[in-house]
Amino acid sequence: MPGEILVTGAAGFIGRHCALLCAASGYQVTALDIKPAPQDVALACRVLRADLAQPDVLEEVRAGRFAAVINQGGISSTTESDRNLLRRTNTDGPLALADACAASGTRFVYASSHSVYGTFEKGTLIAEDAGPGQCSGPLNRYAASKLALDREMARRPAGPTWVGLRYTNVFGPFEEHKKAMASIISQILRRAAQGERIPVFADTLQASRDYVPVREVAGVCLRLVDAEVPSGIYNLGSGLPVSFATLLEWCAEFTGSPLDVRLVANPLSARYQYWTGADMTKLRAALPGAGGLDIGGVRARARELFDAFEAGKP
C-alpha cells in the first residue's frame, strides 16, 4: 500500500494537480496550504491549513510520517519586490522542509523555476549547469529567490534523495486564481475562447516560450516519489519553444475566425524573457519518458484548455 505524501501549496495551481494525482494513484495525501483547499482537494485529501515552515508541520516531517514531500508552496509572482518576504517564503521555508526530510530520510521534491536562467541565446536549449557565459541569470527578485534555494540545496551533504525541478511555462486548468500571473498561454487561450481582445506586447510576436502541460509536471512529481534518481536539479519543460505568433495561429484555428489582437508597448522589455527553452537531457536520462511531448502534444493540450474555456470551465 502506498505511503503518505505531503503536498504543500495544494490550494495553488500545480500543487492542486499534484495532490489530486497522488490521491488518485492510491497515496494518502496531506494537502497543506495557508489558503482554503479547493473542494476537490478537500474531498480527496487530509487538509492542513498551515504554513509549510510551521514547527508542528516540520515535526511531522522529522518524525517520518511521510514517504515523500512535494513542495509546491511559495510566492509565484515574478513582480514581487519584497526581498525579505521572498527569502522567507521561497528559500528559507523550503530549506527548513529539506532539513526535516533529511532528518527522517524522507524524499523531497520541490519547485524551482526556469526563470533562474534569465536571458540566453535564442534558438538554444539551456542545461542545468549553464554558467554566466551562457545566460544572464535572474532578471527579478522572484527568480533570485529560486536560485538561492537551488544553490543551498546543491551544497547539501549526501543523504536522502532530493530533486529540484526547474519548470518552464506550466499551463492547464485551475489557473484562474493567478490572474495576471497565470501562464501567458492560458491567458491568450481564455481570451480567444471568450471572443475578447488579446493584448500582446508588440516586440514579442517572435518571442518563444517552452510550454509544459501541468498534467506532465504532476506526473513527473508523482514518479519522483519513489523513482531511483540521483539527487539534484533538473529542468522540466517540453524542450519545444513555441512563438507567440504560432500560438495566435493556433487560437485562430481553434476559433475558426480572425482574432482581435492588439499590439501594445512592452513596459518590461529590460527584464523580459524573449526565449525560454529547457534542455531535457538530464531528466530524460534519469526518468525515461519524462517531458516526452512533441509539438503536436503541446498543441493538443492547448486545444483541450481552449475547449474548456469555451465551455465556461475554469
Image: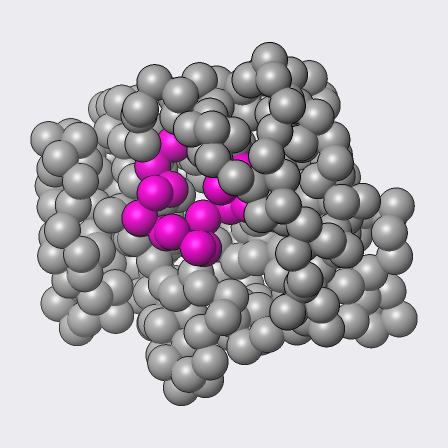
Give coordinates of residue 71: x percent, y percent: 37, 54
At x 38% / y 32%, what residue is drawn? 173
Quarter location, residue 269: bottom right
Quarter location, residue 129: bottom right
Q: Is residue 203 rendered magenta in the image?
A: no
Task: Examine the rendering and report whether any part of residue 104 can be seen.
Answer: yes
Give coordinates of residue 251: x percent, y percent: 60, 25
At x 12% / y 57%, what residue is drawn? 49
Q: Which of the two residues, 211 or 215, is positioned nearer the viewer here?
A: 211
Task: Examine the rendering and report whether any part of residue 284 can be seen.
Answer: no
Residue at the extreme bottom of the image, as rendered: 84
At x 68% / y 62%, what residue is drawn? 265
At x 86% / y 51%, what residue is drawn? 122
Colouring scheme, one of rainbow, by chain, secondary structure, one colour: one colour
Q: Is residue 303 left or right of residue 107?
A: right
Quarter location, residue 29: top left
Which image quarter holds the C terminus? top left
Give coordinates of residue 263: x percent, y percent: 67, 50
Which image quarter holds the N terminus? top left
Give coordinates of residue 292: x percent, y percent: 66, 25
Residue at the extreme top of the image, as rendered: 256
Q: Is residue 47 above or below residue 105?
A: above
> Total of numbered circles in the picture?
0
Residues shaded magenta = 172-188
Q: Which of the two residues, 24 or 313, is positioned nearer the viewer here?
A: 313
The secondary structure that most of the magenta stretch takes on is helix
